[in-house]
Image (tube, rainbow, N blue to C red):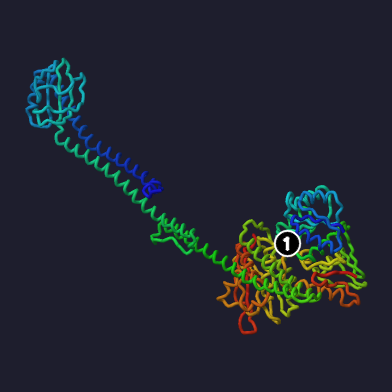
Amino acid sequence: MRVLVVEDDAEMAETLKTSLVADSHDVEWAADGDAGYDMALNGAYDVIVLDRMLPKKLGVSVVRELREKGVSTPVLILSALHDEDHRVEGLNAGANDYLGKPFSTRELLARVRSLWHGRGREPQTRLQVGDLEMDLLARTVRRGGKKLDLQPREFRLLEYLMRNAGQTVTRKMLLENVWDYHFDPQTNVIDVHISRLRSKIDRDFAQSLLHTVRGSGYRLEV
Amino acid sequence: MRPSLALLRTTTFRLALVQAGVVLAFVLALLGYIYIATIGQLTRDADVLLDQEYATLERAYAEGGIRRLEQEVGERAARDGPLLYVLAESNGAVLAGDFTTLPAIVRNAPTHIDLNLPQGAGEGGEARGLIGRLIGGPILLVARDLGDSAVISDRIRRVLWTVLVLGVLVSVASGLMGSWLANRRAEDLSNTAREVMAGDLTRRAPVRGVGDEFDTLAEALNAMLDRLEQLMQTTRTAGDAIAHDLRSPLTRFRQKLESALDAPPNTEADRVALRKAVEEADRLLDMFAGVLRLARVEASNNWRFELVAATDILRELAEFYEPAAEEEGLTFESAVEEDLRVMGDVGLFTQAVSNLIENSMKYTPSGGRVEVRAVKRQDGRVEIAISDNGPGVAPGDRERVLERFVRMESARTTQGAGLGLSLVAAVARLHRGGIHLRDGLDNSAGGKGLCAALVLPAAP
């Protein structure tokens, strides 16, 4: 996957580059907003990782102008300002995801992969992972043909995991996307929700689909 | 700046000058009135008397000619009294009367004049006269000796001047005095402000206790200084607490890295050490995030408030936390009224309530109970009460746990920076509400757990 990193702090950029390369991506780097905009406009990237505070052109402006030019490459904004207003501003400008600094490398990698994975997908009415099937219209879930009884929130949790099947999703991603919560609970709330969901979809079946990725989060895959 | 000159620049001195001007104008007007009412009246009375006398003599001249007039004037002049007479021929030669010469210039029509009586004729002095030329040329003068009244009027005039000068002097002096006094009070306030600026935050402006505007000002200044000192104290405490609380995780962080470095390379052990170091770093970052968030809530006043569907959010939060609570062996119950709405920031509201729920879950031991209740109270406010049957907080400590970084000794071993409740308090203040700590549910030790009630104004 080709990733463009737009970040003015050279040390930060180097760290990002190292992590992304280790996760087997091709990485190019731009050190300011103008250069980032030009490279994004002319190069073919799968994902753009964009710092919010950039010299010459702010990250939010870069995204807005790229979208105006019809560039639909998924954009992840990184920012030290990650309160509600700035997050909404970034997303409204056309960014696909917003990650507050400081963040863990795993969090970043999971989100970059998730962005690429979800890119250009057609609206779906059915999701399938192995023998687990979800009907988004009838709002039913079956595994091996057997109907599973899920609470509404469990349904949304599973839907998000299935849409990101094969990808690691972090607890933070689940909090933001399933519950729309933008704070860190001090307790293991997410783990408990996952284990309840797991008991519904995995307990009676030989093969486990919902895996814990140690230190990162969870992954749904065959 | 010399003090005497400084005094002249004060507002009160300028007011005193205006006041002196007003007093001066008033005294002048008053004196004018008194002058007209006394001396003026004397002159007018004399004029009326002279008119009558002149007319009588004119009539005598008309009836009996110059002989008759000469006789009349002679008789009247001989009489004692305040009136004096002179009759002269058209060339000015005196025929009869009190004087031997005409003391004034003659016009044809009768004219009122002030004149000085010639020495020897009467006592001399001021008089009021009426002089005119009769038909055929003779000149008639009737005069009234003002004698005593002139003395009176002169005295009145002198008194009036004295009053005028005294009045101006007194009003200028009282103005100076007043501005000096006011200046001294203002100087007290300025001195206090200067001393505080120089670093002595314990200084307070003197209050005289007379309840004047300077007292009011001094009290307001003192109240401001109290608040300022309290804030400084809080900041200092917070700074100390941050430094104190940061030391332990930073030390552990350093130790883990150092011991991994000192030990012979061992992939597995290094990995464990690194993971632990990352955990400590996360803890530090969480603390900073908490401090920053709290600072932002406390400092900022540009939050965009919107209608918050409190009922939905509370039910979702209950649903979110219930599984984890049950996992920890807690009985979790929620009762949320329909249609609770507040004006506020959704994110902050959600976080505040979640902090309260997590707080209760954290301190309530397994087998305990956590309840979330939300109602609209009689006074129209929305109350969200989270009660538990944990160890509770002694009534005397309740105020303190809302401060930053304060954790009860019993909680020192658990995680968290002690910012949870202070954030809730800050959020409550921002929403013009409050957080109230009171007795919660009965606990196993025979005491009471904690009930934290977030009270917010309901949206219209």
Q: Is residue A1 left or right of residue B347?
A: right
Left or right: B128, with A207 as reference point: left
Q: Is residue A84 left or right of residue B433?
A: right
Residue B179 in view (yes/no): yes
Residue at the image position 39 percent from the left and 52 percent from the top = B183
Q: Where in the figure is residue A146, as x and y percent of width and height?
A: 91, 73
- Helix, strand or loop at disc 1? loop
The answer to which image quadrant residue B436 occupies is bottom right
Query: Where, by quadrant of the figure, is residue B150 drawn?
Result: top left
Determine the residue positioned at 37% across, 44% down: B18
Image check: B140 left or right of A221? left
Q: Name the spot of residue B192 as percent of width and height, x first.
A: 45, 59
Q: Amino acid at mark 1?
A: Lys
Which residue is the site of mark 1? A101
Residue B340 lies, in percent from the top left, at 68, 65
Neighbour tally class for label 1: few under 14, some 14-19, many 20 plus, Cα within 10 Å: some
Q: Residue furthest bottom?
A: B445
Give the camera-side residue of A86 and B261.
B261
